[in-house]
Amino acid sequence: MTDAITLLGTKGGPAIRPGSSMPTSILVQLAGKTILVDAGLGCTAALTRAGIPLTDLDAVLITHLHSDHYLELGPLLHTAWTAGLKTPLPIHAPEGLDTYWQGFLASMAFDIDTRIADEGRPDLASLAPIHVLDDTSHLRLGDLTVTTLRNHHPPIKDSFALKLTGADKTVVLSGDTAPLPEMVDFARDADLLVHEAMLIPGVQKIVDRMGYKDDRLLKHILRSHTPAEEAARIAQQATVKALALNHLIPADDPEVTEKDWLHATEPHYSGKIHIGRDGMKIPL
């Protein structure tokens, strides 16, 4: 297995429209492990398009409990189960995910119970053990280690950046966050920093299109996310080997092109820049 990161879904936010990219999910293939980070809408089909059998996943990590990061977790696990999952697939997520999982199981009880009785499938509930992810987490998955950093994504407190290290390679995933000075040391000398990014001039257009009567959505986006320029400065200060922009805001404005993202970032970062698109595979 080639060590690589695949950006399965690169859109910031939960809404999709004709022609838009899909919400957040990232495939990490590193140190012999296959990890899904976040499970936004579309992640199940995206994994199969990337050539990953759903039964080959070694773990799922959820960075925070905004719907665009875990909406499809239940359907993913159910589909992996129908595809032959027989051994537990550990889920590492902030506190509260168990409420979602129990609700999903309850909503699908008729189907699950029928398939267990009629098809001889194993108990689905037991195949997804949930472990709480917090800022003290230090996971060991074979030769792959995962450490966390609490980022800044108000109003959600339990939101985390992840550092994955193995096979002499290090990848840092920022998660959803406003600019965070601590990210510089957390990402220091990483082979790849995948950082969320927004273009501020495009944010007002998003809010205007939604038609809300007050400015709460605008304030949320501006206080909870990172301007592309700042993501590039963090990458430069951390001396990472490459930067990938992800969770793009805006992601479905035809007037915003790759040139706009590069114009915002190239003056501030001297390394290789990848402008995320769904299905982009970045070898390590």
Image: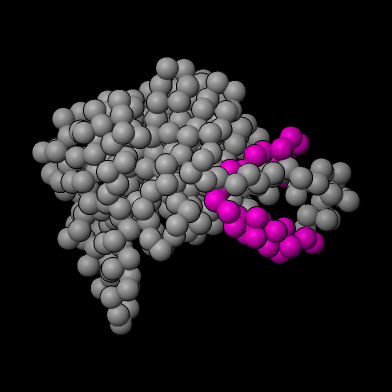
Q: In this view, does 252 lie above or below 190?
A: below
Which residue is at the far right? 117
Residue at the image point whose x is 44% and y is 60% from the top: 156
Q: In which quarter of the image is residue 80?
A: top right
Q: Give the range drawn in magenta.
A: 82-110
| Image coords of residue 25 (percent x, y) | 46, 45
- The residue lying furthest to the bottom in this view is 213
- Tag count in the figure? 0
Is 233 displayed left or right of 128 in the figure?
left
Residue 3 sits above or below residue 160 on the image: above
142 is higher (above) or lower (below) than 45: above
State the residue lying farthest toward the left: 267
Give coordinates of residue 181: x percent, y percent: 27, 43
- The residue at the point 74 percent across, 35 percent down is 87
Q: Which residue lies furthest to the front in this view?
A: 136
Q: Which of 180 and 118 is in front in this view?
A: 180
- Closest to the observer, 250 or 164: 164
